[in-house]
Amino acid sequence: MSGFNIKDIERRMKGAIESLKKEFGGLRTGRASASLLDPIKIEAYGVLTPINQVSNVSVPEPRMLTITVWDKTLTGAVEKAIRNSSLGLNPVSEGETIRIPIPPLSEERRNELARTAGSYAENARIAVRNVRRDGMDQLKKDEKDSVIGKDEHKKKADQVQQSTDASIVAIDDLLKIKQKEITQV
C-alpha cells in the first residue's frame, strides 16, 4: 500500500496559501478592514483570545474601525493589545466602544509593508516546497519498497510538480495584488 496521497499534498499546499491570505489580511493598506485586527490576541479569562472572539469589529468609515467589546472588563486589554501591536494604531476608548482611526501610510511605511508582504509570500513558497519535498520523498520510498513502479513514480511526481507550480503561481498572484493595495495612495 502506497503512503503517497496526492489529495493530501494538494490540501497541504492549499493550507499554505490560506495561511498567507490570513497573514495578508493583517497587513495595513491605509484603508480600514475588520481583518486588520485578526492577528492581535488578548489575555481573556486566562487564555490568549483573538479580538474578534471577545468583541464586534466594524468599519463605519473607510478610515475608521470600531470595536464593541462584549465584556466591559476586557476593554482596557483590547485597547492595550492594539496599541502594543506592530500596526501603528492609536485606539480611543469611549466606554465599551473603541474607535481606531486609520492614519494614511507614509511612503516609508508602505515600502516596509510591501517588504513584509514579500517575506510572508516567501514563507508560503517555502512551505509549498517543503510539502513537495515530502511528497517526492514518499514516492522514492514507495518505489524503493516496490510499492509502485518507475512509470507510476514519474506520473505521480509530475502531479506533485504541477500542484507545486500552481501553488507558487497563486502565491505570486496574491503578492502582486497585496503589494498593489499597499502602494496605492
Image (cartoon, helix red, strand yellow):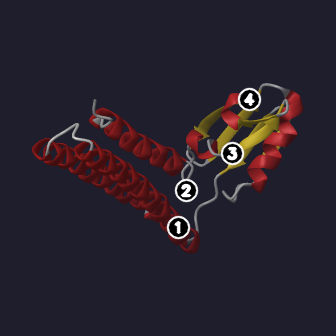
Q: How far across and down, in percent of the image, does residue 132 sit?
A: 33, 51
Of the pair 133 and 24, the residue shown nearer to us: 133
The amino acid type of the residue labelled 3 equals Ile
Foreground tag (1 vs 3): 3
Determine contact: label 2, label 1, CB under 8 Å: yes
Where does label 3 land, which residue? 40
**Residue 27, above or below 50:** below
Mark linked to residue 8 = none
Determine contact: label 1, label 3, CB under 8 Å: no
Q: Judging from the image, what secondary structure is the residue with disc 2 in?
A: loop
Where does label 1 land, which residue? 110
Where does label 2 land, which residue? 30
Mark 1 crowdedness (10 Å alpha carbons): few <14, some 14-19, many ≥20? many
Mark 4 crowdedness (10 Å alpha carbons): few <14, some 14-19, many ≥20? some
Q: Is residue 91 visible?
A: no
Q: Residue furthest left?
A: 151
Q: Disc 3 or 4, which lies upstream in sequence?
A: 3
Q: Judging from the image, what secondary structure is the residue with disc 1 in?
A: helix
Q: Disc 4 or 1, which lies upstream in sequence?
A: 4
Q: How far across and down, in percent of the image, does residue 84 sit?
A: 77, 55
Q: Residue at x 53, y 49 (%)?
A: 23
Q: Residue furthest right?
A: 73
Q: Disc 2 or 4, which lies upstream in sequence?
A: 2
State left or right for residue 104 relative to residue 147: right
Question: The N terminus is located in which quarter?
Answer: top left
Where does label 4 land, which residue? 54
Foreground tag (2 vs 4): 4
Q: How far across and down, in percent of the image, does residue 134 sit?
A: 37, 49
Determine contact: label 2, label 4, CB under 8 Å: no
Q: Disc 2 or 1, which lies upstream in sequence?
A: 2
